[in-house]
Image (cartoon, rainbow, N blue to C red):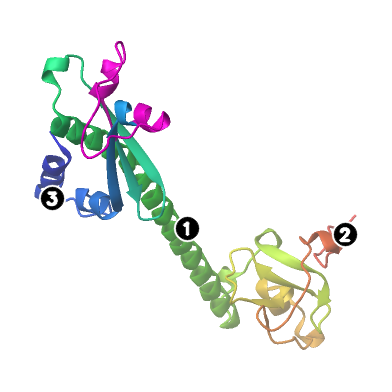
């Protein structure tokens, strides 16, 4: 079964997920070039055929004329090669040799383009998962602001600022799955500690500090040298 027959079977079965097709392979080829080992030997010796006349090879080197190479130059500048060797000189046919050499060269393109496609799909999947996690984080923060205690984060869910604190005195923090468009928040709000504090001691809290506007050093940065506003366990 050749590549085109396999593609027809894939289409017949309704398999529509992203994949590499024979058409993709052909579209990736910018140019193709053919020569035999004999051509290479002659060129190395500075003896290219003149006016279409091919001089016979020296005794013992005749098999060089039976080895055909195909070089495919891809549109990104990469090259792949294919070979075709004929065991019986009587069966050698230049056109057939080129077809087989090209087929073998094309076979090397499939894994290259397959790897490229898988890399792109993996990046898309990672980005989708990242966005989904970020949306979930923002949803939880919105629920906390609406008074939903069940949405509260734990300290282990948060990244704390190295030194920056809310007006209330609690360290600033953000959920670990926040997106680049997220913000620093008062950790007492994210953990719902502020809502459970004695109302008589209620303190004002700062508004969120967007990442895009404020440069706040986190506890994870090497330059923090271990500094953190994370609540420490009671000794």
- As helix, strand or loop, the secondary structure at mark 3 comes to helix
Q: Residue at x 58, y 64 (%)?
A: 177
Horizontal placement of 227 versus 185: left or right? right
Q: Is 94 within the magenta?
A: no
Disc 2 crowd, CA 10 A, few/some/many (<14, 14-19, 20+): few
* The label number, if any, that marks residue 126 in the structure image: 1
Question: Which residue position holds label 2?
Answer: 225
Q: What segment carries the magenta color?
A: 40-69
Going from N to C along the chain, the mark reached first, 3 or 2, is: 3
- 70 is higher (above) or lower (below) than 213: above
Q: Quadrant of the N terminus?
A: top left
Q: How many marks?
A: 3
Q: Residue at x 11, y 43 (%)?
A: 9
Tell me residue 209's x, y (percent): 70, 82
Tell me residue 222's x, y (percent): 81, 59
Badge nearest the viewer, 3 or 2: 3
Going from N to C along the chain, the mark reached first, 2 or 1, is: 1
* The label number, if any, that marks residue 11 in the structure image: 3
């Amino acid at each position: 079964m050749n590549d085109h027959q396999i593609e027809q079977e894939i289409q017949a079965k309704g398999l529509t997920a992203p994949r590499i097709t024979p058409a993709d392979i052909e579209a990736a080829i910018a140019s193709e070039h053919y020569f035999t080992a004999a051509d290479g030997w002659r060129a190395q010796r500075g003896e290219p055929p003149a006016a279409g006349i091919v001089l016979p090879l020296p005794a013992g080197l005749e098999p060089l004329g039976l080895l055909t190479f195909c070089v495919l130059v891809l549109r990104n500048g990469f090259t792949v090669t294919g070979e075709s060797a004929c065991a019986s000189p009587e069966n050698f046919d230049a056109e057939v040799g080129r077809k087989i050499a090209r087929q073998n060269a094309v076979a090397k393109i499939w894994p290259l383009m397959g790897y490229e496609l898988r890399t792109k799909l993996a990046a898309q999947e990672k980005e989708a998962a990242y966005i989904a996690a970020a949306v979930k984080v923002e949803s939880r923060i919105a629920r906390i602001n609406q008074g939903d205690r069940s949405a509260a984060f734990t300290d282990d869910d948060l990244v704390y600022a190295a030194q920056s604190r809310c007006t209330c005195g609690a360290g600033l923090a953000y959920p670990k799955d926040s997106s680049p468009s997220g913000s620093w928040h008062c950790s007492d709000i994210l953990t719902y500690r502020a809502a459970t504090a004695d109302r008589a001691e209620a303190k004002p809290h700062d508004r969120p500090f967007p990442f895009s506007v404020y440069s706040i050093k986190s506890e994870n940065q090497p330059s923090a040298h271990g500094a953190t506003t994370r609540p420490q366990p009671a000794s």
